[in-house]
Image: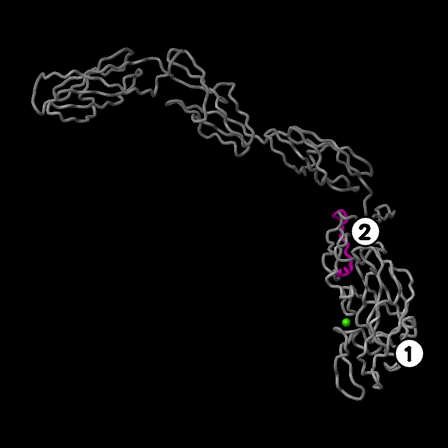
């Protein structure tokens, strides 16, 4: 086994026996002790040495050995050499060994690892070097990480790495690549339906990489896909390759669509928190045929029933066309909002619960609501006694008032209202059955009850401040869980003689 000899520095102490040969005295040198490199290779220059000088008087001094003090230093030929150092009249000797066996060149071994996955680390021994000695012999030595400069796998590509061994360096190229896919499977968000003439979209693959990582990869380059063809209707088998893994799957190519419209009969009324209901799209294909497809939740670009009021639904048809339509979201009354008697109260003027859009105004009237009244023959206005305001000026045959009520659970409920009769200039009572027809969730119901005259005493109709609260005008109603609608339709008499009613609020009371 050869031993490399460069850069090996052994400090040795060479003691020289003290002998007072010349100028003995207090300033005379008593001993010299030389320390320095003792092993040299052929051609090396003097590596330097230090010596400790001890004087007769005991003083000590460190002195650097210079060429002038030295004789016998010769590395031109291999062998053991005695070097003499003379200082202050004293002589010391030290021995150096000059070797002609050393590493003269170094090469990177052929079987060194040069293929690295991005982000991977160097492992000691990945590379090795072949050391060539001056006698022609060689030795293979593992390269450890501390011998490397420039090893960097942070980016894919070719990288030049330097190996240092003593004063020798060698370089080699490593190739850094993206990790291979050990396995891949189709991600469920991959588009599997195309239409005739469509361009390739993308394929999503869930990939397990050789470095232990996993990720979802988007392949949007059709050149990585075999079998994509949307020239005609039918099923196609696609094959996608990604870094060594191949996934095969089927797509369906459907007829090309030339236009899309929203079909009539969609759900336009929702309750707060309701999920999407029903809507359909009418498709007209390029070949002139038509089809109807339901709107599914994945097509909804916008759908929000978190708050009551008008809301917009935006349907995205395959990214080709958007269709927008309005819905109404009815408010949800909580138990905390019920009256002491357990009734849920819905003010006629609160459009979150009461839809007055189907109630036309009487001729020359300007508002469907009022909160004041006026004493006959005066300009004196005062509160009409309603909570907030009440309906007014809508005694028109066919007018509809729709009450929306969201029940937490199916059950039996009673329907009521607070109203006042305006018939006979506010001086006569009115039977509700003369004024309205009633539908509950689309089914006819009988309505009954007496709404008393609005005007107390004998004062004329403008002085209308009396209200009748009826808690049950239609008997026990079976309401569904979720949204229910109660629809009042004004009868012919309502519009002419009765002029009833002004309505302050509606009530729905659970039957317990
Ligand atoms: Ca009111």
Residue 323 inside the magenta-drawn segment: yes
Please report whichever mark, 2 or 1, sits nearer to the chain's N-terminal start: 2
- Secondary structure under the numbered disc 1 in the rendered image: helix
State the mark number for residue 333.
none
In this rendering, the count of numbered labels is: 2
Q: Point out the image quarter for the N terminus.
A: top left
CB under 8 Å between callouts 2 and 1? Answer: no
Q: Quadrant of ligand 1?
A: bottom right
Q: Left or right: where does residue 458 sit relative to residue 68?
A: right
What residue sits 16% from the left and 23% below the top?
53
Which stretch is magenta? 316-333
User: For this rendering, which residue is in front, 510 or 156?
Assistant: 510
Looking at the image, which residue sits at the far front? 512
Label 1 neighbourhood size at 10 Å, few (<14), some (14-19), many (20+)? Answer: some
Residue 458 inside the magenta-drawn segment: no
Considering only vertical position in the picture, is 193 above or below 66? below
What residue sits 44% from the left and 29% below the top?
149
The residue indicated by pointer 1 is: 497
Q: Quadrant of residue 201?
A: top right
Q: Left or right: where does residue 116 sit relative to residue 373?
A: left
The residue indicated by pointer 2 is: 260
Residue 298 lies, in percent from the top left, at: 75, 47
What residue sits 24% from the left and 12% below the top?
81
Q: Quadrant of residue 309?
A: bottom right
Q: Point out the image quarter for the C terminus.
A: bottom right
Residue 384 lies, in percent from the top left, at: 77, 79
CA gap, disc 2 and disc 1: 49 Å
Residue 172 lies, in percent from the top left, at: 48, 24
């Amino acid at each position: 086994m050869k031993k490399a000899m460069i850069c090996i520095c052994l400090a040795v102490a060479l003691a020289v026996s003290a002998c007072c040969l010349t100028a003995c005295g207090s300033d005379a040198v008593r001993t010299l002790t030389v320390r320095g490199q003792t092993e040299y290779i052929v051609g090396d220059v003097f590596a330097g040495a230090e010596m400790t000088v001890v004087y007769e008087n005991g003083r000590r001094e460190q002195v650097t050995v210079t060429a002038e003090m030295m004789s016998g230093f010769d590395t031109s030929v291999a062998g053991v050499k005695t070097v003499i150092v003379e200082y202050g009249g004293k002589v010391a000797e030290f021995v150096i060994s000059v070797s002609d066996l050393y590493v003269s060149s170094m090469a990177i071994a052929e079987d060194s690892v040069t293929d690295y996955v991005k982000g991977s680390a160097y492992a000691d021994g990945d590379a090795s070097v072949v050391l060539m000695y001056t006698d022609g012999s060689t030795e293979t030595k593992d390269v450890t990480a501390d011998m490397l400069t420039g090893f960097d796998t942070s980016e894919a590509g070719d990288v030049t790495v330097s190996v240092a061994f003593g004063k020798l360096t060698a370089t080699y190229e490593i190739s850094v690549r993206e990790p291979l896919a050990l396995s891949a499977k189709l991600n469920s968000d991959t588009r599997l339906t195309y239409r005739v003439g469509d361009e390739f979209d993308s394929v999503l693959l869930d990939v397990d990489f050789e470095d232990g990582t996993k990720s979802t990869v988007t392949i949007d380059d059709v050149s990585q896909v075999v079998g994509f063809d949307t020239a005609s209707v039918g099923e196609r088998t696609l094959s996608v390759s990604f870094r060594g893994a191949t996934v095969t799957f089927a797509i369906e190519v459907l007829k090309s669509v030339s236009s899309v419209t929203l079909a009539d009969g969609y759900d336009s009324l929702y309750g707060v928190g309701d999920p999407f209901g029903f809507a359909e799209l009418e498709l007209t294909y390029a070949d002139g045929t038509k089809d109807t497809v339901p709107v599914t939740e994945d097509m909804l670009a916008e759908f929000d029933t978190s708050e009551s009021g008008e809301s917009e639904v935006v349907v995205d048809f395959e990214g080709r066309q958007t269709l927008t339509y309005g819905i109404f979201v009815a408010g949800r009354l909580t138990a905390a909002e019920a009256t002491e008697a357990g009734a849920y109260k819905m003010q006629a003027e609160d459009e979150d619960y009461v839809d007055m859009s189907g109630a036309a105004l009487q001729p020359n009237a300007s508002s469907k609501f009022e909160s004041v009244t006026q004493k006959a023959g005066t300009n004196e206005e005062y509160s009409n006694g309603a909570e907030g305001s009440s309906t007014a000026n809508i005694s028109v045959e066919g007018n509809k008032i729709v009450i929306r009520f969201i029940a937490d659970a199916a059950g039996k409920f009673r329907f009521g209202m607070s109203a006042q009769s305006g018939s006979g200039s506010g001086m006569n009572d009115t039977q509700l059955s003369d004024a309205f027809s009633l539908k509950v969730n689309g089914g006819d119901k009988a309505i009954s009850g007496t709404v008393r005259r609005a005007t107390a005493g004998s004062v004329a109709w403008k002085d209308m401040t009396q209200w009748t609260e009826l808690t049950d005008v239609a008997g026990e109603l079976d309401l569904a869980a979720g949204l229910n609608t109660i629809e009042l339709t004004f009868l012919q008499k309502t519009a002419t003689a009765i002029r009833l009613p002004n309505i302050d609020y509606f009530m729905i009371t659970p039957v317990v």
